[in-house]
Image (cartoon, rainbow, N blue to C red):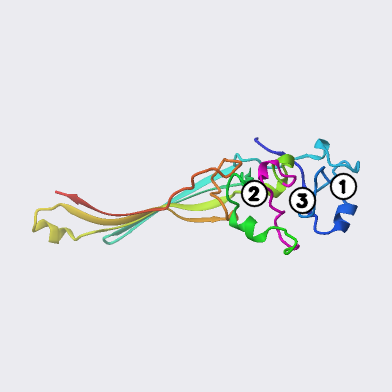
């Protein structure tokens, strides 16, 4: 299973007292993540990394295909999803790109010391709270349930069509990726990209007519 070897974050350095009381990685400042000193040697080193339980290969994948007809109406629905899966996603941001709005709006700063995200850096990939010390703050539960496809159709009465020598006319509307239920807010949970450079699933809606002579 493709799991991760990461530092465990236990909070954010919000005060000078925090800096005095917790072991820290070199270069740490207020607003950076606090890492757990796993081996309790008073320093944050590679020996403090911990293997995660889950990786980005889902342990559970499932789908449900439903269909129904009533008189001249027909309906088909496809749900698909995955479970017991995690994805490490640290967007490559700073001078190289834009921050997720959730990070930018809720980051630690001197004017927002209670922020739920670490302070921003000029480059997330080389930040103490980012790529320099890969950690589980950026490990997301990417389980999801998606309404992948839904279609509803209506067939015109055959008696009406026989007068104009048409065997069947069916009107329909369908859609793809209509709804997604997930805890992930900033990216598509189906991504396998660790830096969020992944084109999301597109929502598509079609209207059409099938005519059979």
The span from disc 2 to disc 3 (Cα, nearest Å) is: 16 Å
- The quarter holding residue 132 reads top right
Residue 101 image offset from top left, x and y in percent: 59, 57
Question: What element does badge 2 sit on?
Answer: strand
Compared with residue 19, is residue 112 higher up or lower down, i.e. above or below?
Answer: below
The span from disc 2 to disc 1 (Cα, nearest Å) is: 25 Å
Q: Is 12 contained in the magenta span?
A: no
Q: Quick one: label 2 or label 3, which is nearer the N terminus?
A: 3
> Residue at coordinates 84% horizontally, 46% vertically from top-left?
24
Which quarter shows the N terminus? top right
Instruction: State the residue position of label 1.
Output: 23
- Relative to residue 66, is residue 103 drawn left or right? right
Residue 106 image offset from top left, x and y in percent: 67, 60
Marks counted in the figure total 3
**Disc number placed over residue 140 in the picture, else none:** 2
Instruction: State the residue position of label 3.
Output: 33
> Residue at coordinates 65% horizontally, 35% vertically from top-left?
2
The answer to which of 29 and 102 lies nearer the viewer is: 29
The span from disc 1 to disc 3 (Cα, nearest Å) is: 11 Å
The answer to which of 11 and 112 lies nearer the viewer is: 112
Question: What element does badge 1 sit on?
Answer: loop
Q: Quick one: label 2 or label 1, which is nearer the N terminus?
A: 1
């Amino acid at each position: 299973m493709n799991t991760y070897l990461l530092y465990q974050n236990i909070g954010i350095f919000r005060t000078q007292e925090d800096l005095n009381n917790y072991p820290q990685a070199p270069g740490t400042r207020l607003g950076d993540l606090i890492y757990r000193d796993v081996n309790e040697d008073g320093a944050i080193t590679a020996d403090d990394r911990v293997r995660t339980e889950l990786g980005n290969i889902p342990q559970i994948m499932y789908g449900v295909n439903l269909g129904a007809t009533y008189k001249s109406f027909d309906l088909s629905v496809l749900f698909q999803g995955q479970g017991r899966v995690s994805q490490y996603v640290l967007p490559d941001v700073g001078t190289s790109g834009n921050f997720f709005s959730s990070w930018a709006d809720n980051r630690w700063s001197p004017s927002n010391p209670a922020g739920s995200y670490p302070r921003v850096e000029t480059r997330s990939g080389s930040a103490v709270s980012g790529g320099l010390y890969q950690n589980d703050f950026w490990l997301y539960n990417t389980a999801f349930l998606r309404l992948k496809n839904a279609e509803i159709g209506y067939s015109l009465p055959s008696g009406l069509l026989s007068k104009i020598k048409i065997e069947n006319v069916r009107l329909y509307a369908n859609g793809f990726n209509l709804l997604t239920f997930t805890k992930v807010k900033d990216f598509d949970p189906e991504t396998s990209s660790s830096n969020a450079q992944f084109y999301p699933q597109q929502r598509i809606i079609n209207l059409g007519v099938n005519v059979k002579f």
